[in-house]
Amino acid sequence: MQRQRRFFVLCPFCLQIFFAILFVVLSTQISRAGAWPMPKGRGQIISTFTWQGAARGFDRQGNARVDLLFQKYENALFIEYGLTDRWTVIARPALQNVHLRFENTVDAANGLGATELSIRRVLAQKGPWVMSIQAGGFVPGSVENGFDKPLGQKGLDWEVRTLAGRSLQVMGRPGFLDVQAAFRERSLGSSNEIRLDSTFGVDLSRRIQLLGQANIVIGLPSSQPAIRTVDSIKAQAGLVWFYRPRRGLQVSLSRTFMGRNVVRDTGVTIGFWQKF
Protein backbone atom coordinates (compact mmCIF):
# COMPACT_ATOMS: atom_id res chain seq x y z
CA MET A 1 0.00 0.00 0.00
CA GLN A 2 3.03 2.29 0.03
CA ARG A 3 2.98 4.94 -2.64
CA GLN A 4 6.55 4.76 -3.82
CA ARG A 5 7.06 4.25 -7.55
CA ARG A 6 9.50 1.76 -9.05
CA PHE A 7 10.25 -0.96 -11.58
CA PHE A 8 11.28 -4.48 -10.59
CA VAL A 9 11.28 -8.10 -11.79
CA LEU A 10 11.51 -10.68 -8.97
CA CYS A 11 14.79 -12.60 -8.81
CA PRO A 12 14.96 -16.36 -9.62
CA PHE A 13 15.77 -17.05 -5.94
CA CYS A 14 12.11 -16.34 -5.06
CA LEU A 15 10.95 -19.06 -7.45
CA GLN A 16 13.44 -21.48 -5.93
CA ILE A 17 11.81 -21.03 -2.52
CA PHE A 18 8.40 -21.90 -3.97
CA PHE A 19 9.46 -25.00 -5.89
CA ALA A 20 11.62 -26.29 -3.05
CA ILE A 21 8.43 -26.81 -1.03
CA LEU A 22 7.05 -28.88 -3.89
CA PHE A 23 10.01 -31.20 -4.45
CA VAL A 24 10.74 -31.90 -0.79
CA VAL A 25 7.32 -33.36 -0.01
CA LEU A 26 6.52 -35.06 -3.34
CA SER A 27 9.00 -37.80 -2.52
CA THR A 28 7.13 -38.80 0.61
CA GLN A 29 -0.30 -40.29 -0.19
CA ILE A 30 -5.82 -38.45 1.95
CA SER A 31 -6.75 -35.04 2.68
CA ARG A 32 -8.30 -32.17 0.77
CA ALA A 33 -6.92 -28.86 -0.52
CA GLY A 34 -7.73 -26.15 -3.04
CA ALA A 35 -7.35 -28.24 -6.21
CA TRP A 36 -9.89 -30.83 -5.06
CA PRO A 37 -13.56 -30.29 -5.94
CA MET A 38 -16.35 -29.98 -3.43
CA PRO A 39 -18.85 -32.87 -3.82
CA LYS A 40 -22.15 -31.90 -5.42
CA GLY A 41 -24.39 -30.15 -2.89
CA ARG A 42 -21.65 -29.99 -0.25
CA GLY A 43 -19.43 -27.14 0.84
CA GLN A 44 -17.56 -25.36 3.60
CA ILE A 45 -17.43 -21.94 5.24
CA ILE A 46 -14.26 -20.67 6.88
CA SER A 47 -14.84 -17.56 8.98
CA THR A 48 -11.64 -15.77 10.00
CA PHE A 49 -10.58 -12.79 12.09
CA THR A 50 -7.12 -11.49 11.22
CA TRP A 51 -4.91 -8.79 12.70
CA GLN A 52 -1.90 -7.53 10.72
CA GLY A 53 0.60 -4.95 11.85
CA ALA A 54 3.90 -3.46 10.75
CA ALA A 55 6.33 -0.73 11.71
CA ARG A 56 8.57 -1.12 8.66
CA GLY A 57 8.13 -1.52 4.92
CA PHE A 58 10.33 -2.76 2.07
CA ASP A 59 11.62 -0.10 -0.30
CA ARG A 60 12.08 -0.48 -4.07
CA GLN A 61 15.45 -2.20 -3.51
CA GLY A 62 13.93 -4.76 -1.15
CA ASN A 63 15.41 -3.32 2.04
CA ALA A 64 13.17 -3.14 5.13
CA ARG A 65 14.08 0.43 6.03
CA VAL A 66 10.87 2.37 5.37
CA ASP A 67 9.39 3.73 8.61
CA LEU A 68 5.61 3.52 8.75
CA LEU A 69 2.72 2.39 10.93
CA PHE A 70 0.31 -0.19 9.50
CA GLN A 71 -2.68 -1.84 11.23
CA LYS A 72 -5.35 -3.98 9.63
CA TYR A 73 -8.30 -5.84 11.14
CA GLU A 74 -10.29 -8.14 8.87
CA ASN A 75 -13.36 -10.36 9.25
CA ALA A 76 -13.64 -12.61 6.19
CA LEU A 77 -15.84 -15.47 4.99
CA PHE A 78 -14.35 -18.02 2.59
CA ILE A 79 -17.17 -20.06 1.03
CA GLU A 80 -16.86 -23.09 -1.29
CA TYR A 81 -19.86 -25.00 -2.70
CA GLY A 82 -20.05 -27.92 -5.12
CA LEU A 83 -22.43 -27.19 -8.00
CA THR A 84 -21.57 -30.59 -9.49
CA ASP A 85 -18.85 -33.13 -8.82
CA ARG A 86 -16.57 -31.15 -11.17
CA TRP A 87 -17.68 -27.52 -10.70
CA THR A 88 -17.09 -25.59 -7.46
CA VAL A 89 -18.00 -21.95 -6.80
CA ILE A 90 -16.00 -19.73 -4.43
CA ALA A 91 -16.81 -16.44 -2.71
CA ARG A 92 -14.80 -14.42 -0.23
CA PRO A 93 -16.26 -11.16 1.14
CA ALA A 94 -14.39 -9.30 3.88
CA LEU A 95 -14.99 -6.43 6.30
CA GLN A 96 -11.83 -4.43 6.98
CA ASN A 97 -10.49 -1.67 9.17
CA VAL A 98 -7.16 -0.41 7.79
CA HIS A 99 -4.84 2.38 8.96
CA LEU A 100 -1.56 3.36 7.31
CA ARG A 101 0.71 6.22 8.34
CA PHE A 102 3.64 6.88 6.01
CA GLU A 103 5.77 10.01 6.33
CA ASN A 104 3.22 12.85 6.68
CA THR A 105 0.34 10.95 5.05
CA VAL A 106 -2.38 9.00 6.84
CA ASP A 107 -4.66 6.67 4.88
CA ALA A 108 -7.50 5.01 6.82
CA ALA A 109 -10.79 3.34 5.92
CA ASN A 110 -13.41 1.01 7.38
CA GLY A 111 -15.89 -1.13 5.45
CA LEU A 112 -16.08 -3.78 2.72
CA GLY A 113 -12.86 -4.77 0.98
CA ALA A 114 -12.50 -6.41 -2.42
CA THR A 115 -14.77 -9.48 -2.79
CA GLU A 116 -13.56 -12.56 -4.67
CA LEU A 117 -16.07 -14.43 -6.87
CA SER A 118 -14.62 -17.47 -8.67
CA ILE A 119 -15.52 -20.80 -10.24
CA ARG A 120 -13.28 -23.88 -10.39
CA ARG A 121 -13.43 -26.98 -12.63
CA VAL A 122 -11.59 -30.26 -12.21
CA LEU A 123 -9.66 -31.14 -15.37
CA ALA A 124 -8.23 -34.52 -14.33
CA GLN A 125 -8.21 -36.72 -11.25
CA LYS A 126 -6.30 -39.98 -11.00
CA GLY A 127 -5.14 -41.78 -7.88
CA PRO A 128 -3.62 -39.26 -5.44
CA TRP A 129 -3.40 -36.53 -8.11
CA VAL A 130 -5.89 -33.85 -9.12
CA MET A 131 -5.60 -30.88 -11.51
CA SER A 132 -8.06 -27.99 -11.79
CA ILE A 133 -8.47 -24.57 -13.38
CA GLN A 134 -10.15 -21.55 -11.79
CA ALA A 135 -11.29 -18.16 -13.05
CA GLY A 136 -12.81 -15.23 -11.23
CA GLY A 137 -12.95 -11.56 -10.44
CA PHE A 138 -12.32 -9.25 -7.48
CA VAL A 139 -15.12 -6.73 -7.02
CA PRO A 140 -13.81 -3.54 -5.36
CA GLY A 141 -15.15 -2.31 -2.04
CA SER A 142 -14.61 0.85 -0.03
CA VAL A 143 -11.40 -0.21 1.76
CA GLU A 144 -8.47 -2.32 0.59
CA ASN A 145 -8.61 -3.32 -3.07
CA GLY A 146 -5.01 -4.48 -3.41
CA PHE A 147 -2.02 -3.71 -1.24
CA ASP A 148 -0.53 -1.38 -3.83
CA LYS A 149 -3.55 0.95 -4.07
CA PRO A 150 -4.74 3.84 -1.93
CA LEU A 151 -7.60 2.69 0.28
CA GLY A 152 -10.94 2.70 -1.49
CA GLN A 153 -9.53 3.05 -5.01
CA LYS A 154 -11.95 1.26 -7.35
CA GLY A 155 -11.24 -1.14 -10.21
CA LEU A 156 -12.23 -4.70 -11.12
CA ASP A 157 -9.39 -7.26 -11.19
CA TRP A 158 -9.51 -10.59 -13.06
CA GLU A 159 -7.62 -13.81 -12.45
CA VAL A 160 -7.06 -17.22 -14.07
CA ARG A 161 -5.44 -19.91 -11.92
CA THR A 162 -4.19 -23.48 -12.37
CA LEU A 163 -4.18 -25.81 -9.38
CA ALA A 164 -2.52 -29.18 -8.79
CA GLY A 165 -2.88 -31.34 -5.70
CA ARG A 166 -1.54 -34.63 -4.40
CA SER A 167 -2.49 -36.72 -1.38
CA LEU A 168 0.53 -37.82 0.66
CA GLN A 169 1.70 -40.00 3.49
CA VAL A 170 4.14 -38.16 5.76
CA MET A 171 5.76 -40.41 8.35
CA GLY A 172 2.66 -42.60 8.29
CA ARG A 173 0.24 -39.69 8.64
CA PRO A 174 -2.19 -38.54 5.89
CA GLY A 175 -1.49 -35.19 4.30
CA PHE A 176 -1.63 -33.20 1.07
CA LEU A 177 0.22 -30.75 -1.11
CA ASP A 178 -1.56 -28.07 -3.15
CA VAL A 179 0.36 -25.94 -5.67
CA GLN A 180 -1.19 -23.04 -7.60
CA ALA A 181 -0.05 -20.58 -10.26
CA ALA A 182 -2.14 -17.57 -11.33
CA PHE A 183 -2.10 -14.56 -13.61
CA ARG A 184 -3.99 -11.55 -12.24
CA GLU A 185 -4.93 -8.66 -14.52
CA ARG A 186 -4.98 -5.50 -12.45
CA SER A 187 -6.94 -2.30 -13.08
CA LEU A 188 -6.55 1.45 -12.63
CA GLY A 189 -2.86 2.12 -12.50
CA SER A 190 -1.67 -1.17 -11.00
CA SER A 191 0.83 -3.67 -12.38
CA ASN A 192 -0.38 -7.11 -13.48
CA GLU A 193 0.85 -10.01 -11.34
CA ILE A 194 1.99 -13.60 -11.36
CA ARG A 195 1.00 -15.38 -8.14
CA LEU A 196 2.47 -18.65 -6.84
CA ASP A 197 0.81 -20.28 -3.84
CA SER A 198 1.46 -23.58 -2.09
CA THR A 199 -0.16 -25.28 0.89
CA PHE A 200 1.18 -28.31 2.75
CA GLY A 201 -1.00 -30.07 5.32
CA VAL A 202 -0.54 -33.10 7.52
CA ASP A 203 -2.80 -34.68 10.14
CA LEU A 204 -0.83 -34.73 13.39
CA SER A 205 -3.67 -36.72 14.95
CA ARG A 206 -7.23 -37.68 14.11
CA ARG A 207 -8.43 -34.18 15.06
CA ILE A 208 -5.44 -31.86 14.60
CA GLN A 209 -4.09 -30.73 11.23
CA LEU A 210 -0.89 -28.77 10.66
CA LEU A 211 -0.92 -26.31 7.73
CA GLY A 212 1.97 -24.44 6.13
CA GLN A 213 1.60 -21.95 3.28
CA ALA A 214 3.87 -19.94 1.03
CA ASN A 215 2.54 -17.05 -1.10
CA ILE A 216 4.63 -15.27 -3.74
CA VAL A 217 3.51 -12.19 -5.69
CA ILE A 218 5.57 -11.15 -8.72
CA GLY A 219 4.70 -7.78 -10.22
CA LEU A 220 5.04 -7.65 -14.00
CA PRO A 221 6.74 -4.71 -15.75
CA SER A 222 4.47 -1.98 -17.08
CA SER A 223 4.96 0.22 -20.12
CA GLN A 224 3.83 3.19 -18.00
CA PRO A 225 6.68 4.55 -15.85
CA ALA A 226 4.24 5.94 -13.27
CA ILE A 227 2.99 2.43 -12.42
CA ARG A 228 5.09 0.77 -9.74
CA THR A 229 5.30 -3.00 -9.43
CA VAL A 230 4.90 -4.81 -6.10
CA ASP A 231 6.50 -8.09 -5.04
CA SER A 232 6.27 -10.09 -1.83
CA ILE A 233 7.02 -13.44 -0.25
CA LYS A 234 4.81 -14.40 2.68
CA ALA A 235 4.70 -17.56 4.80
CA GLN A 236 1.99 -18.78 7.16
CA ALA A 237 1.83 -21.68 9.60
CA GLY A 238 -1.07 -22.84 11.75
CA LEU A 239 -3.11 -25.58 13.36
CA VAL A 240 -6.74 -26.60 12.84
CA TRP A 241 -8.46 -28.51 15.66
CA PHE A 242 -11.52 -30.42 14.44
CA TYR A 243 -13.39 -30.64 17.73
CA ARG A 244 -16.31 -32.15 15.82
CA PRO A 245 -16.26 -34.07 12.52
CA ARG A 246 -17.43 -31.03 10.51
CA ARG A 247 -16.29 -28.16 12.71
CA GLY A 248 -12.84 -26.84 13.42
CA LEU A 249 -10.92 -24.00 15.07
CA GLN A 250 -7.87 -22.49 13.40
CA VAL A 251 -4.96 -20.50 14.80
CA SER A 252 -2.16 -19.32 12.52
CA LEU A 253 0.71 -16.85 12.24
CA SER A 254 1.96 -15.13 9.08
CA ARG A 255 4.95 -13.00 8.14
CA THR A 256 6.08 -11.14 5.02
CA PHE A 257 9.78 -12.03 4.77
CA MET A 258 10.79 -10.39 1.50
CA GLY A 259 9.33 -7.80 -0.83
CA ARG A 260 9.48 -4.49 -2.59
CA ASN A 261 7.05 -1.62 -2.05
CA VAL A 262 5.06 -3.59 0.56
CA VAL A 263 4.79 -3.52 4.34
CA ARG A 264 6.79 -6.05 6.35
CA ASP A 265 3.75 -7.24 8.26
CA THR A 266 3.14 -9.88 10.89
CA GLY A 267 -0.34 -11.40 11.19
CA VAL A 268 -2.41 -13.50 13.58
CA THR A 269 -5.54 -15.35 12.40
CA ILE A 270 -8.27 -17.10 14.37
CA GLY A 271 -10.75 -19.04 12.25
CA PHE A 272 -13.86 -21.22 12.48
CA TRP A 273 -14.39 -24.03 9.92
CA GLN A 274 -17.86 -25.39 9.14
CA LYS A 275 -18.46 -28.12 6.55
CA PHE A 276 -21.99 -28.69 5.30
Image (cartoon, rainbow, N blue to C red):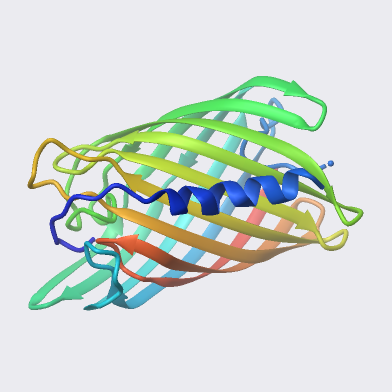
Q: Residue at x 69, y 65 (%)?
A: 239
- Residue 180 horizontal/vertical position (percent): 54, 38
Quadrant housing residue 31: top right
Nearer to us in this view, 273 or 213: 213
Placement of the C terminus among the 4 image quadrants:
top right
Q: Residue at x 13, y 56 (%)?
A: 5
Q: Is residue 265 above or below residue 248?
A: below
Q: Residue at x 42, y 42 (%)?
A: 195
- Residue 101 horizontal/vertical position (percent): 18, 76
Q: Residue at x 39, y 64 (%)?
A: 258
Placement of the N terminus among the 4 image quadrants:
bottom left
- Residue 203 horizontal/vertical position (percent): 81, 57
- Residue 272 horizontal/vertical position (percent): 62, 60
Q: Residue furthest right?
A: 172
**Is 72 left, or right, of 104 in this rendering?**
right
**Is 161 left, or right, of 259 in this rendering?**
right
Q: Is residue 84 visible?
A: no
Nearer to us in this view, 74 or 205: 205
**Is 107 left, or right, of 37 in this rendering?**
left
**Is 99 left, or right, of 195 in this rendering?**
left
Q: Looking at the image, how many numbered discs can be counted on the residues? A: 0
Nearer to us in this view, 93 or 33: 33
